[in-house]
C-alpha cells in the first residue's frame, strides 16, 4: 500500500484511543452495576499498588499526598491511551497486528482482575467487566478501522472522506459517555443512599465539652477538631467500597469461645461511646498533614471481644476491610483502658464513605496501618506469629505505636510578619501518654517554652502558641520540639517513614520586617 493512499496517522490514533475508551467505559459501567466487582482500570491499578515496592509507595505519598490515587489512575489511563493510539496507527495498514496488540493489552486487565484482592464477588463474576472491555475494544477497533479503509478507498488519492468515519467516531464516543454516566450514578449509590437514611442514636457515654482554652488564639492554626472534609485520607482503595449498612456484617472469630456476628442494627442498639481521638498516619513526614482530631462514636472493641471470649495465647487481632485490606493490631491495645472502638460515627454524623462507612476501627496511639481498618468486616483473634498483614509484608513493623511529635502551623514557609506581631503556634501529639511541654527556638538560639492550650485528654493532640517579643528583622528559622508526660523529649535525629514512622524536629523559615 503506498503512502498516498494511507489514512492520516491521527485518524488511526483516534480510532485506537476511542476503541480502548469504549471498552473501558463498558467494563467500568458493568462493574458499577455489579456488587463487589472492581473496574478493569481499578484492577490494573490495584495490582500496581500491590506490586509496587514500599519505597515507591512512600515516594508517591510524599510527592502527591492524597492525590496519589488520581495520579495512579491517570498514569494507567495515559499508558493505555498511548498504547491504543499506537495500535490504531499500525492498524491503518496492518489491522491484524493492531487487533493482536489490543487483545494483549486487554488480557493484562483480565489477568489483573483474576487476582484482584479487592473483589468480593465470585472470581467468574469479577472477570466479566475485563472480558467485556476486551470484546468491546476489539469490536470498536474493527468498526473504526474498516470505516477508515472504506472511506480511504472511496476517496480520491490523498484525501479522506470524513463523514462515515465521523459517524463511527460519534457512535463509539456515545458509548464512552454512557459508560461514564452509569459509573458516576451507580459506583457508590447503595452506600450513599444507606448513609443518608441513618440517624445515630444519642451515645450512652457522650464526650464531655471541649475544655476552655483548648483552642489557642493564633490565626491560621489547625482547628482543634478537624472537619470531616479536611480529615486526611491515606489508604489503598482506588474506589471507595460500596457497602450499604443494611447488608453489612461484622464477624468476630478465631481464638474465641464464641463466634460473634453483628449487623449494623446490632451496633446501633448497643451502648455507644463518644470520644475525641487524634489519628496519625505512618506516612506523615515531619511537620506533615496526615494527622487529625475528630469526635468518634462507636462501640468499644473490648466490649465486643468480651462477648466473644478471648482464649489464652492470643496476642493480636487481624482486621479485614470490605476490599480485603488487612491490619494486625496488638490485642492489648484493644482491651486496655484506651478508647479503641468500632466506630460508626465521625463528628456527630455517620462515617463519611471515604472514612470507612459503615464501620471502621479507631485505636488511639497506633499508626493507621496497624489499626485504622476502614469498611471493616472481620475481626480475627489470633497471634502475630500466625499471620502477616498488608503492610507488614512490605517492610513495615508488625507493631507500630505512634511516635510523639510536634508541628508548626504558623508561620507557613516564608511567611512575613511585621516586627510587632510575631505570634506563632501549632500542635503536638503523644497519644495515650500526653504532652507535657512544647519548646521553640529561633535560628540557633535557646529553647523557650511555648504556651500550651488546655489538655483535653491524652488521646488528643494539644495546641501551643508562642510570641516573639522584640523580634529582629530579617530571615529566620523557627524550630519546635515536644516533651511527653513520661519525660521523653523529641529527638533531632531524622528517621524515614519505613519501618515505623518518622522522627525529627519540624522547622519553618519566615521573615520579619
Image: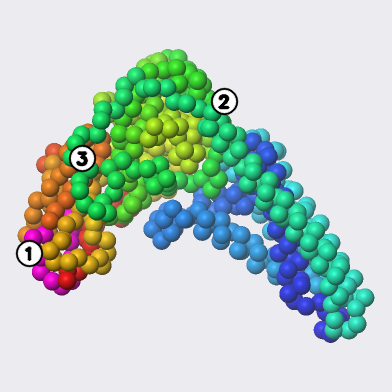
Based on the displayed image, in which of its 4 quarters is residue 348 positioned? top left
Which region of the structure is painted magenta? Answer: 468-484
Residue 408 placement (x, y as % from top left): 23, 55
- Magenta stretch holds residue 152: no
Q: Is residue 503 left or right of residue 380?
A: left
Q: Earlier in the sequence, mark 2 or mark 1?
A: 2
Which callout, 2 or 3, points to the residue nearer the camera? Answer: 3
**Closest to the observer, 159 or 234:** 159
Badge 2 density bin: few <14, some 14–19, many ≥20, Cα 10 Å: some
| Label annotation for residue 214 | 3
Q: Is residue 165 above or below residue 7?
A: above
**In the orientation shown, which residue stands out farthest toward the right?**
154
Q: Is residue 360 above or below residue 367?
A: above
Q: Quadrant of the C terminus?
A: bottom left
Q: Secondary structure at mark 2?
A: helix
Q: Which residue is mark 2?
A: 246
Residue 138 placement (x, y as % from top left): 78, 57
Q: Residue at x 20, y 34 (%)?
A: 211
Amino acid at each position: 500500500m503506498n503512502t498516498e493512499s494511507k489514512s492520516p496517522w491521527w485518524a488511526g490514533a483516534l480510532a485506537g484511543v476511542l476503541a480502548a475508551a469504549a471498552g473501558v467505559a463498558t467494563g467500568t459501567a458493568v462493574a458499577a452495576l455489579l456488587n463487589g466487582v472492581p473496574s478493569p482500570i481499578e484492577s490494573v491499578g490495584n495490582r500496581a499498588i500491590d506490586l509496587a515496592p514500599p519505597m515507591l509507595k512512600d515516594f508517591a505519598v510524599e510527592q502527591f499526598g492524597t492525590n496519589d490515587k488520581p495520579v495512579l489512575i491517570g498514569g494507567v489511563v495515559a499508558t493505555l491511551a498511548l498504547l491504543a493510539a499506537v495500535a490504531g496507527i499500525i492498524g491503518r495498514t496492518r489491522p491484524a497486528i493492531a487487533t493482536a496488540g489490543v487483545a494483549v493489552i486487554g488480557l493484562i486487565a483480565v489477568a489483573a482482575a483474576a487476582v484482584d484482592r479487592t473483589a468480593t464477588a465470585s472470581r467468574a463474576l469479577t472477570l466479566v467487566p475485563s472480558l467485556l472491555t476486551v470484546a468491546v475494544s476489539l469490536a470498536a477497533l474493527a468498526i473504526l478501522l474498516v470505516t477508515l479503509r472504506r472511506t480511504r478507498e472511496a476517496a480520491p488519492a490523498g484525501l479522506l472522506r470524513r463523514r462515515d468515519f465521523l459517524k463511527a467516531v460519534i457512535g463509539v464516543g456515545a458509548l464512552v459517555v454512557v459508560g461514564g454516566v452509569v459509573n458516576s450514578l451507580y459506583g457508590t449509590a447503595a452506600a450513599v443512599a444507606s448513609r443518608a437514611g441513618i440517624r445515630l442514636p444519642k451515645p450512652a457515654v457522650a464526650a464531655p465539652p471541649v475544655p476552655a482554652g483548648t483552642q489557642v488564639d493564633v490565626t491560621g492554626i489547625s482547628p482543634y477538631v478537624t472537619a470531616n472534609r479536611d480529615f486526611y485520607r491515606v489508604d489503598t482503595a482506588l474506589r471507595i467500597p460500596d457497602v450499604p449498612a443494611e447488608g453489612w456484617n461484622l464477624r468476630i472469630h478465631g481464638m474465641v469461645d464464641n463466634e460473634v456476628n453483628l449487623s449494623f442494627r446490632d451496633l446501633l442498639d448497643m451502648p455507644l461511646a463518644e470520644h475525641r481521638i487524634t489519628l496519625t498516619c505512618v506516612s506523615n513526614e515531619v511537620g506533615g498533614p496526615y494527622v487529625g482530631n475528630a469526635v468518634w462514636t462507636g462501640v468499644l472493641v473490648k466490649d465486643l471481644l468480651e462477648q466473644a471470649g478471648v482464649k489464652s495465647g492470643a496476642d493480636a487481632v487481624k482486621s479485614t476491610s470490605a476490599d480485603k485490606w488487612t491490619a494486625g493490631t496488638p490485642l492489648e491495645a484493644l482491651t486496655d483502658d484506651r478508647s479503641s472502638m468500632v466506630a460508626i460515627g465521625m463528628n456527630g454524623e455517620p462515617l463519611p464513605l471515604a472514612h470507612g462507612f459503615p464501620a471502621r476501627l479507631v485505636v488511639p496511639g497506633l499508626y493507621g496501618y496497624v489499626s485504622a481498618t476502614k469498611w471493616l468486616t472481620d475481626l480475627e483473634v489470633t497471634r502475630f506469629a500466625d499471620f502477616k498483614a498488608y503492610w507488614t509484608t512490605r517492610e513495615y513493623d508488625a507493631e507500630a505505636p505512634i511516635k510523639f511529635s510536634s508541628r508548626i502551623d504558623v508561620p507557613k514557609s516564608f511567611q512575613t510578619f511585621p516586627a510587632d506581631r510575631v505570634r506563632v503556634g501549632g500542635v503536638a501529639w503523644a497519644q495515650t501518654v500526653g504532652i507535657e511541654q512544647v519548646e521553640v527556638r529561633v535560628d540557633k538560639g535557646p529553647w523557650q517554652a511555648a504556651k500550651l492550650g488546655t489538655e483535653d485528654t491524652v488521646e488528643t493532640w494539644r495546641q501551643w502558641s508562642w510570641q516573639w517579643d522584640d523580634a529582629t528583622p530579617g530571615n529566620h528559622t523557627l524550630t519546635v520540639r515536644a516533651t511527653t508526660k513520661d519525660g521523653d523529649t523529641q529527638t533531632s535525629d531524622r528517621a524515614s517513614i519505613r519501618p515505623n514512622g518518622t522522627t525529627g524536629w519540624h522547622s519553618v523559615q519566615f521573615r520579619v520586617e
